[in-house]
Image (cartoon, rainbow, N blue to C red):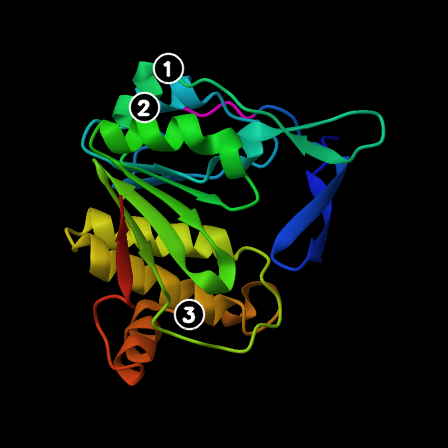
Amino acid sequence: MPESTRFTNTTDGEYRHQTIHASAGPVQLTAEALGARIVHLGPVDAEIDLEQTCVLAPPDAFVGVTPQGLFRYWGPDRVVQLQALEFSEVVVRRLNAVVVSQYEGSVADQLMRAVSASGGIAVRTLGSRGCEVWSGSVHEQFTSPVAVEEVDSTGAGDVFAAGLFVRLAAGGSLASAVAFAQAAAAASVRGISIQTIAAGAEIDQLLADAGTSGSGSTTEIQ
């Protein structure tokens, strides 16, 4: 019987170290499985073929990716390492948005810059320091409008990405989508696992309580 993919995560400041214990192996996605208005791809250990998936996704779907699992590899010690990859034009031109963490660092630069140059949005989250956003030739840093006491940051990047994709797909401005995503991520770190993932109305209320429906402070970086 196939195993589930299982990791152990340990955190050193805002950086994460991972050990893999089991892998479920490749996942074969179909056009039917991808038939949604928003397609959020979040590979864990390179189990999807990103190019094939981009081809199969509906042409009118918003396609976003949190690609950390594509960069992972490990040896006999099962300690996860990162490797830089080249991505095809098929992938670059199809992605509407890509979100990575500071942990992926420079290994994701090619994908991020290529996606933003092709008209998409590229984001690097920076934990409590906010995020960097590339959109075309514009590079900005956003601070979070919501401050909370962190309990567990596991999955916060995926929550951020989901919030960002939902608001961008709905036609929201980049600044308001980033603020919503940051508030969603902030809410998620207040407790363990999925217990504190907030619904849209609660996220909007967090922003209202913080006195903003737009973004935290932004800095355009040349």
Q: Residue 92, labelled with which disc?
A: 2
3D distance between C-alphas at marks 1 and 2: 6 Å
Q: Residue 170, labelled with which disc?
A: none
Please give the range of residues in magenta. 27-31
Task: Give the answer, above or below, for where 218 lies relative to 120.
Answer: below
- Disc 1 residue type (three-letter): Ser
3D distance between C-alphas at marks 1 and 3: 35 Å
Identity of the residue furthest to the front in this view? 222
Q: Residue at x 37, y 45 (%)?
A: 123
Residue occupied by mark 1:
88
Identity of the residue furthest to the right in this view? 77
- Disc 3 residue type (three-letter): Ala
Q: Are marks 3 and 2 in contact (CB under 8 Å)?
A: no
Reply yes or no: does residue 23 show up in magenta. Answer: no
Task: Point out the image quarter for the C terminus.
Answer: top left
Left or right side of 141 for 198? right
Task: Give the answer, above or below, for where 86 lies relative to 197.
Answer: above
Characterize the local packing of mark 2: few (<14), some (14-19) or many (20 or more) Cα atoms within 10 angstroms: many
Q: Secondary structure at mark 3?
A: loop
Characterize the local packing of mark 3: few (<14), some (14-19) or many (20 or more) Cα atoms within 10 angstroms: some
Residue occupied by mark 3:
198
Q: Are marks 1 and 2 in contact (CB under 8 Å)?
A: yes
Q: Residue at x 54, y 28 (%)?
A: 70
